[in-house]
Every structure is written in C-alpha cells, then in structure tokens.
Image (cartoon, rainbow, N blue to C red):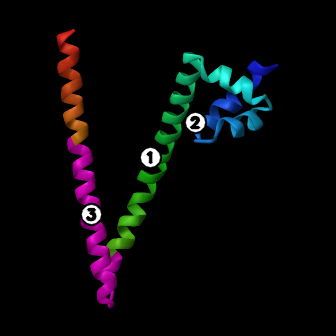
Amino acid sequence: MTSRNRPAAVLALAQGRTNGQAAKAAGVSARTILRWVDDPAFRQEVDDTRTELLRLAVGRLAAASTKAVDALVDALDSERGQARVQAARTLLDACLSLRESLDLEQRLATLEADEESRR
C-alpha cells in the first residue's frame, strides 16, 4: 500500500514541505517518510521532481516576462517621474541580472565541456 503513496510524498517534499506534511499528504506515517528519505533513489526522485517544478515555473515566468517588460516600457512614458524612474531602474536591474545569468551559464557550459573532453 505505501509504495502507491510515494508519488504524493515525493511531490510534497519537492515542494518544500516538511517530512510530517509529506507523511500527511501521502497518508503514511512519519516513520515511513524517514525510511523513504534514507533511500538514495527516493531522494533522487524528489530532486528530479523539484527540478521539473522549477523548470515549469521558469517557463511560466518566461512567458509572462514579455508582458512585464511591456508594462515597464509603458511606465517609462508615464507622466509621473517617480514611475518612470522606478521602471527604468527595474529594467536596468533585470538586464544586468539576465546578463550575469547568461554569462554564468556560458562559463559553466564551457567548464562542463572541458571536463567532458578530459574524460
């Protein structure tokens, strides 16, 4: 019976819930959750699920980002100076963050490729 409840526990833990909350979500005892958490395959399943949840969230953010940028660009034309300054600051901060993220991603890919070629 308990193995059928593992997916509910995996999802709860991947979402950042406590062991007790995961036990309740899965309908199992806290002791069962502790036993499952000791299993490397179970922990990997939680990690994989968390990665997938983050991938989905990033996808939703990317889809909404165009609207957000449009709203900020519109605010740049606002009559209110404070709104314009805040929009400009937000856009510049976002550009810098994105640039840093892209640079780090590129550097990491280079390091991974170098490591792979050494094997």
Q: Is residue 56 left or right of residue 20?
A: left
| Residue picked out by circle 1 | 58
| Residue picked out by circle 2 | 14
Q: Earlier in the sequence, mark 1 or mark 3?
A: 1
Q: In the figure, 31 relative to 90: above or below? A: above
Nearer to us of marks 1 and 3 is 3
Q: In the figure, 97 relative to 84: above or below? A: above
Q: Is residue 83 left or right of residue 26?
A: left
* Crowdedness near tag 3: few (<14), some (14–19) or many (≥20) residues, C-alpha within 10 Å: few
List x then y, in percent, for residue 39. Answer: 59, 17
* Crowdedness near tag 1: few (<14), some (14–19) or many (≥20) residues, C-alpha within 10 Å: few
| Residue picked out by circle 3 | 93
Residue at 27 percent of width and 52 percent of height: 98
Residue at 24 percent of width and 24 percent of height: 112
- Viewport quadrant of the C terminus: top left
List x then y, in percent, for residue 10. Answer: 63, 30
Alpha carbons under labels 2 and 1: distance apart: 16 Å
Q: Quadrant of residue 118?
A: top left
Instruction: Give the extent of the magenta segment.
Output: 74-103
Q: In the displayed image of the protein, which residue is found farthest to the top?
A: 119
Q: Earlier in the sequence, mark 3 or mark 2?
A: 2
Q: In the figure, 82 relative to 15: above or below? A: below
The three-letter amino acid code for the residue at tag 3 is: Asp
Q: Secondary structure at mark 3?
A: helix
Q: Secondary structure at mark 1?
A: helix
Magenta highlight on residue 93? yes
Q: Secondary structure at mark 2?
A: helix
- Viewport quadrant of the N terminus: top right
Q: Nearer the viewer, residue 112 or 2?
A: 2
Residue at 71 percent of width and 40 percent of height: 21
